[in-house]
Image (cartoon, rainbow, N blue to C red):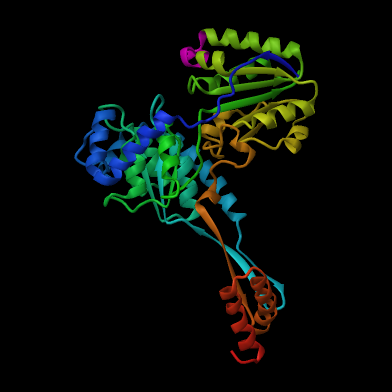
Amino acid sequence: MRIVKDGGHRLFEEDEETSRYVARMLRELRARGIDAVREYSRTFDEWDPPDFELSPREIDEAIGRCGDQVVADTAFCQGNVRAFAEAQLATLIPLETEIRPGVVLGHKHIPVSCVGSYVPGGRYPMFGSAQMSIIPAKVAGVDTVIGCTPPVKGEGYFPATINAMKQAGADRIFVLGGVQALALMAYGMGVVDPADMLCGAGNRFVAEAKRQLFGQCGLDLLAGPTEIAIIADDSADPALVACDLLGQAEHDPNSGQFLVCLSASFARRALAELERQLEVLPTKDIAGASWRDNGRVLVAESRDEAIALSDDWAPEHLEIHVEDTDYYHARLRNYGSLFIGEETTVAYGDKAIGTNHILPTSRSARYTGGVWVGKFLKTVTYQKMTPAASVEVGTVTARQCEMERMLAHAITAHVRTERYGGGDV
């Protein structure tokens, strides 16, 4: 391996100051409820409407402010997300099996009842994020999805976001952002049913609020700054590789980019192309800072070393611009979502193609995937037995419990072996 350009691999780490600040906010929000929500909304977003929840009339007005093309394009993107979620759901079938005579075990998938979906705004109005948490939840069978999205500072909602949330299936829509939105959904505050699960990305305060609210409710995942890795051999187009790296770099000055090349000559061409494109990029202030601080370029000595380097980085998004895509697809293990060949790109997954863009970051792809329909389902088990099977299993269970000195447990087995085995209880 040879390092051509080194950059920080920034992990999502707990910021003690942010943690203390969010903890103080959550305590106040829980104690004072909607009054505290309103104060924080005024302070941070200059937003203090009579009601944070949009009425059906207001939702219709928002949709009416979207052009026909926006509505049609959103429907196209959401149709793909819904179709893929439905196909995923079809793979999740209940199970019942008789593992030995008279012993029947099974599992079934039960959707959570209420999900709180946070649709971020911030630097960019990412209305496409609405479909990524709301649609899989509704396809899974979630009864109620509460949607919160931050206001455009002092102005109100972004119409395309409200359209996307409504078309995705949100049951209630609130124009409310930040920690106060997460607290409203988690605690309910007499306004909504407390969410069983929170879903969606946001800034560091939103991420920290989710972390601290875990246990009060479930979470999709904790996400840090976005990431892209690209593996490129000499068959790749350096201009396209550079373009895709910059496509993610514009997200945030802290976003990470990681290029693994199979030759030093390709690395040099890709770097030169990236610098050329950066000069004319409209968002170069953000993308340039991100690339300068967090961009990394390595040259691997073989395909297998390239795979090992990528798996160690465990990127959120991984593109493979290589001749033999099947070789890499079969061997790569750690990534949030894989983009195979130059014909696809991260932006397709973010917006339109149908896979989910709420994905693991900061090397958490080593142990989890991203949001999908299964995130909103609880897989629960059950068991039933015949009397004869209860005697057989109970005899062994009683001995195991006695060996562990858990005598009350043993008694629950003994009374059944005696009852169903014909002895005296």
- Residue 420, located in which quarter of the rendered image? bottom right
Vertical comparison of 175 with 106: above or below: above
Which residue is more in the foreground, 145 or 35? Answer: 35
Residue 152 on image: x %, y %: 31, 28
Q: Is residue 304 magenta?
A: no
Q: Residue furthest left?
A: 50
Q: Residue furthest front?
A: 405
Residue 282 on image: x %, y %: 47, 13
Q: Residue furthest right?
A: 302
- Residue 268, located in which quarter of the rendered image? top right
Vertical comparison of 141 with 418: above or below: above
Q: Does any portion of residue 162 appear in the rendered image? A: no
Q: Is residue 101 left or right of residue 91?
A: right
- Residue 380, located in which quarter of the rendered image? bottom right
Write the residue at 43% across / 36% down: 208
- Number of numbered discs: 0
Q: Does any portion of residue 247 appear in the rendered image? A: yes
Q: Is residue 287 magenta?
A: yes
Quarter occupied by the N terminus: top right
Which residue is more in the foreground, 180 or 374? Answer: 180
Quarter occupied by the C terminus: bottom right
Residue 85 on image: x %, y %: 55, 47
Range of residues picked out in magenta: 280-288
Main SS class of the magenta portion in the image: helix
Q: Is residue 305 left or right of residue 251?
A: right
Write the residue at 45% across / 46% down: 214
Write the residue at 29% across / 42% down: 29
Q: Is residue 65 left or right of residue 12?
A: left
Residue 290 on image: x %, y %: 52, 17
